[in-house]
Amino acid sequence: MNTFIRIALVLYASLLPATAYAVSEITIRAASIEHPQLEAKNASLRFNLIKPNSNLTIGAELKPEVDKDWTTLQIACTLTQASKPDAMDCGEGLIKNAAVNLPFSFEIQQLFNQGEFSLSKLNAKASLQLKNASFSDAAGLHAAEKLNGKVDIAIQRQGLSWAWQTKLDWQTGELFWQPFYVESAGHQLTAAGALTAGVLDVHRAHLTMRQVGALDVSGQLRLSDLKLIALNANLPNLNLSAAYPLLFKPFLGNTAFNNTAIAGYASLSLQIQNAELKSFDLRLKEVDVADIDQKFALYKLDAEIPWSYDKPEQVSVSYKSGSLLNLPLGKTNIRAEVNRFSLTSPNITLPILDGALNLSDISAARIGGEWYWHLRAQLQPISMADFSHQLNLPIMSGKASADIPLVTYSNGLLSTDGSMVLNIFEGTATVTQLTMRTPMGIAPKLNADIALRNLDLGDLTRTFSFGAIEGKLDGDIEDLELQNWKPVHFDASLYSSPGRYKKKISQRAVENISALGGGGAAAAVQRSFLRFFEQFNYGKMGLSCKLRNDICEMSGVESTPQGYVIVKGSGIPSITVMGYNRTVGWSELLARIKRVTDGNSKAVVK
Amino acid sequence: MKKILASFVLLFSTLFACQFAVAAADLEVNTPAISAIKGSMQARHGQLAAHYASGAVGLTKDGLIAVRDANAVPLKDRASLNAAVAAENADRSKLYKEIATANGHPEWQPEIQSTFASRWIDKAQGGWWYQGASGWVKK
């Protein structure tokens, strides 16, 4: 027999003479009690039997084997009425150690129905009131402060099971239970159920979260391994703006959705059986969601998203308007079929500006916690004027369209098979080998090859206020890599298109091109006698740049011992523009282009 | 014995080869990705600096940061503290990877990370906590 039980027997033995011989007070003290799981010291129990104020005081310092700190336990109770010998009112209770300070009061209204003092007839009613309680675990990840709340519990023995009812009223205080933080209280829980053979049955539980909404739950939990045998949960009307910081944000961590403003209502019901999600039904009603950093927004979002483990379901999502990376999105309806962990849809049309992005043959699957998907994408012509305006680019004319037979997303990488054709400046820009990594993340990466054909130099130079050039431009930008939308690597060459057409270059453009090459003597010499001509003829022009490590290695259409030819003259009056700097810092080159296109400062030509 | 000696020589030469490789790495290399990550870390530093000073957050020996003592922070700020630490660590890991990639040697990431670990600790202000060989140390 262990020590703990031996002490309990001593206590029992000393109570018997108390009733028989009208002892007025019983005091038991133990300096130290030892048990494999629990140590106690300075334990005292004082039982004052003088009616009508009979009372019980217990005090001890306890140390469970797993802890290193002692915990003080104090409780003082009055045994109120003679008519109810099983009632007890403990007004001043305290559990206190370094991490926990739990002042409480505790009241047992009854333990048994009158006159039926047998465990099989148990009918207990008790309540516990926490008074400014606080606790914290060592890491501070589960903690509460100034907690005031009341718990009412009732338990009845019914045959082989225990029936229970509880009511929890969280009055004030704050709680952090990693990753959740709940403050300002005003939340209530009522629940009833039964406990039978180690299975906790919740017949009904109703949780009201202030401002957020109400949750109804029923289910069964096996206590030995905390296995959810069954759970039905129903959130009929969830206020998303109040629920987002409380319930969702803790789970969104580093995702693109962790910094949004959201308004509107949602309802959710879900069923779990044998610890597996069997089905859910999520509805969104008139939800507005906007990223605070303005990466995306969707307005008047409605959704019906049923899901079942056993059978395919039809999903529909629609929104009235929105934006993605500054591009406005028009009214959209999306329908898809979900079949367990995969999603398919024959066609989704996303209106963008005056065109639309058509996605077809969509198929997505979630495997091992990662999304994989592929689809065919077609961009119906959108106006470049609108597009460039929305992205704060110089206003371009023309249309952009694209046809990508296969877009795949796997392991965070978006890759394309096929080409995107932009009809701009009366020519074409063809983007191939496009891949993107974490487009919404902090350092998005884009790789592509771009081929420019027959761009109208007149349009182009007007758009970028470069000084007029007449002619056509081809270009190849290969192995382009953008990081955070800024170029870090490419092999680019721009050159006049082959073929016969009018080739004229203005005095101003000559100055600007010379300025891009880093300033040169050639133009200056020619300017001396050609300065009176507004424009010149050229035979061909070209400029290329290999960007590596922020340095652009430049060349032109021909190499000369001193440098390279950017514009080669032809006819009368003709002009030849030379470049002399073979390497230019990329940021310096950008600064020069900006100076030129801003037109604020005249290019320096010596 | 000879075999052991030979393997020691081999081990040391690999160690030194590694050190030499990292010594050759340009830790100040800059790409738009690196500057975006640094910008994001810079923006977060204002939020974290107070936590370094209070001891709530410390510098780990592997070049990341960790919540050392959440009790130094009011309850309502603990979730955002944990989120900031997680976001900072995601940025730091990405930074080491990008610096290794920008040096043309993605395989250098572990060495770059440990070089940064000692750099962060050297640069830490007095009163901040860092992880020493045998636990947390106040600088």
Image (cartoon, rainbow, N blue to C red):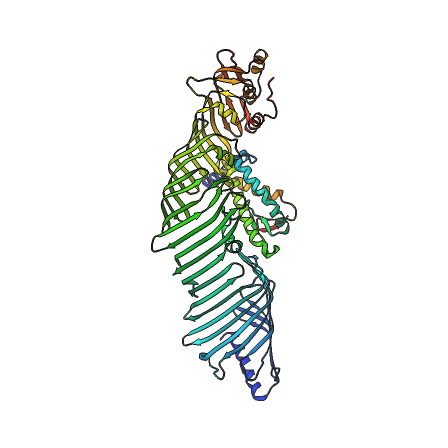
- Residue in the picture at 52% in, 58% down: A212
Residue B17 picture location, percent across and down: 51, 35
Q: Viewed as shown, does residue A68 lie left or right of A455? A: right
Q: Which residue is drawn at 46% across and 36% down?
A: A446
- Image quadrant containing the C terminus of chain A: top right
- Say above or below: A378 vs A206: above
In the image, residue A217 above or below residue A255: below
- State the image coordinates of residue A197 (x, y, percent, origin top left): 41, 71
Q: Is residue A119 above or below residue A300?
A: below
Which one is in front, A108 or A96? A108
Task: Locate residue A242, reporting x and y percent.
Answer: 53, 55
Looking at the rendered structure, the number of numbered marks drawn on it comes to 0
Q: Residue B94 at what x, y percent from top left? A: 51, 41
Residue projecting furthest to the right: B126
Residue A28 visible here:
no
**Can residue A145 be seen here?**
yes
Indicate left or right for A430 with B111 as reference: left
Name the residue nearer the viewer: A529 or A199: A529
User: Residue pushed farthest bottom?
Assistant: A21
Residue A80 lies in quadrant: bottom right
Please name the residue shown 55% across and 51% down the image: B82
Instruction: Name the residue nearer the viewer: A36 or A175.
Output: A175
Q: Closest to the observer: A36 or A91?
A: A91
Q: Is residue A473 left or right of residue A54?
A: left
Instruction: Indicate left or right for A217 with A516 as reference.
Output: left
